[in-house]
Amino acid sequence: MILILVKKEIKQLLRTGQYRVAGFIVLILTIMAFLVSTGYYKTVQEQHNIAKSNERHVWEHQADKNPHSAAHYGTYAFKPKYPLSLIDQGVDKYVGISIFLEAHKRNEAQYAAATDKTGLARFGELTPDFILLFIMPLLLILLGHDIFTKEKERGTLRLIKSQGINPRLLVIGKWLGVFTPIASLTLVVFTIAGILLGSLSDFGSFSILHLLCMLLIYLIYYAVFTSISLIASSLSKNSGISLVSLLVFWILSSLAIPKAATNLAELKYPYPTKQSFDEAIVLDKSKGLDGHNPWSEAAKILEQETLRKYNVKSLEELPFNYDGFRMQKGEEHEAQIYYRHYNELKKVYGTHNEVYNSFTFFSPFLPTRFLSMSLARTDYNSHWDFSDAAEKYRMLLQDKLNSNFAANSKYGDWAYKADRSLWKEMPEFVYSPPALSEILYQNKMSMVALFTWLMVSFCALFFFTKPI
C-alpha cells in the first residue's frame, strides 16, 4: 500500500513538472558549484604545494649564520586542504592559510582568501554547501507545501479516506513521496562529489566514511524539513497559507536565528580587540624573562639559579653557552604567556559555542551547519587545532636551534655560525587533523539537537495529521 502511495505521489510530482524543473535547476547549480569549487581548490592546492616546497628550499639553503638568527629568520607552517572542504568551505576563506613561525612571537594565520575579495563577495558565492543548506530545503518546501492542501482544495482527500485507507499509511506514503525525490537528488549530488574527490590527485586523504557521515547529516536535515512541510500543509486551509508559513520558517531557521545566535554570543561574551590582546601580551612579556636582555631582574635570577645548579662561579665556566640557554628559557617563558592568553580566547570561543548550541534546538539549520563544517574540517575547532600544532612546531624549532647554539659555542661567542646541514636537520611541519571520532565527540550537542529535531518533527507530524 505504501509503495502504491509513494509511486502515486512521485508520478504526480513528475506530471506537474514542479520537481522536474526545480530538480533540474538545482542539479545544474550543484554541478556548476562543484566545478567552480574543484577548479578553485586545484588552484589553491597547487599554490600550497609550490609555496611549501619553495619555503623549505629557502630554509634549507640559508647562508651560514647563528642558529638564533635563523630562528628570527623564521619559516612558514601551511594549513593543508582537505577533500571535503570542496563541499563545505566553512570558515577557511576567513582564517588564513599559513602561519609565520619566528623567535619570541606566536603569529596569527595570514593570507585569508577573503581579504582578496571585493565588496560583491558579501552577496555570497555559489558553493555546494550553499546549495545543500539553503536551496534544497526550499525545493522541499516547494514540493511539500501543498501535499495535503491540494487534496483538500480538489476534494479528493475525502475520496481517499472513503476507501478505508489507514491515515498513518497515507501520511507515511506522502512523506516518502516528498522525501524520496530529494533523497535521490542528494545521493546523485554526493555520488558526483565522491567521483570528483576520488579522481583528484594530490588532494589530501579522502575518507569515504566522512563523506557518508556528511550525507547522513544532510538526509536527516531534509527529513526534518519534509515533516515540517507536511505538518504545515495539513494544518493550512489552502496552499498559499502553507507556502507562506513554510517560507517564514525557512527564513527564521536559516537566516534569522543563526544571526541572532551570533549577535547574542558577541553581546554576552565579547572577544578582546586585537589591540588590547597584543598590549596584554606585551605587558606580561615585559614582566618576565627576555632572552635578549641579560640585565633584567628575571635574567639575573635565572643566572644565579644556573650558577648554583652547575656549582660554578662564572658563566664562562658553564659547560654550554649561557646566551643560547637564556634564549631558550626566554622562549619557554614567552610561550607560556602566549599559551595563557590564547587559552583565554578559547574560553570565549567556548562560551560562544555554548550559546550556539542552545540555539540548535530552535533551528535545524544550526546543528547541520556545524556538523557539516566539522566533517569537512573547515570549522573553527579545526583551525584552532592547526594553530596549536603550528605553535608546538615553532617551539620544537626554537629548542633545536637554541640548543645547537648553546652546545657548540662558548659564552659571549655570538660570532658562532651553523652551516646548512643544521637547517636540513630541522624536521618539516606535519599536521595530523582530528580523527572522525574526535570530531563527532566535539559536536555531540549538535548531533543530539539534530536527532531531537528528527524525532520531534516525526512525532508532531503524526500528531497533527491524526484528524485527517
Image (cartoon, rainbow, N blue to C red):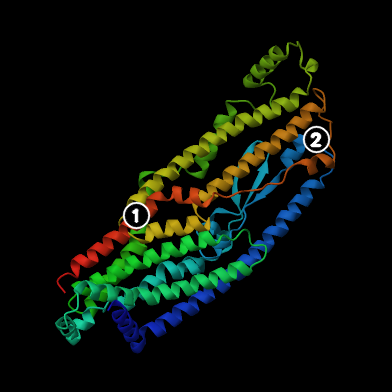
Query: How busy is the neighbourhood of tag 1: few (under 14 within 10 Å), some, or many (20 plus)?
Result: many
The answer to whether 28 is drawn above or below residue 42 in the figure is below
Residue at mark 2 = 66
Nearest to viewer (mark 2 / mark 1): 1
User: Is residue 96 depicted above or below 37 in this figure?
Assistant: above
224 vs 235, left or right, is right
Vertical order, 335 against 314 (above or below): below
* Observer-nearest of 342 and 223: 223
Residue at the image position 30 percent from the left and 73 percent from the top? 175
Provide residue 395's location: percent of width, then percent of height.
65, 37
Q: Please give the label number shown on residue 449.
A: 1
Categorize mark 2 by other alpha carbons within 10 Å: few (<14), some (14-19), many (20+). Answer: some
In the figure, residue 465 lies in which quadrant?
A: bottom left
Residue 178's spot in the image, x, y percent?
33, 76
Residue placed furthest toward the bottom: 15
Q: Quadrant of the C terminus?
A: bottom left
Q: Amino acid at mark 1?
A: Ala
Task: State the residue at coordinates (47%, 62%).
Answer: 214
Any mark on residue 229, and which? Answer: none
Q: Residue at x 43, y 51 (%)?
A: 443
User: Residue 416 in the image: x percent, y percent?
Assistant: 84, 31
Query: Of the residues shown, which amino acid type is indicated by label 2?
Result: Asn
Q: Is residue 121 left or right of residue 333?
A: left
The part of the image, by quadrant, that contains residue 462 is bottom left
- Asked whether the viewer can see residue 19, the reply is yes
Front one among 295 and 298 = 298
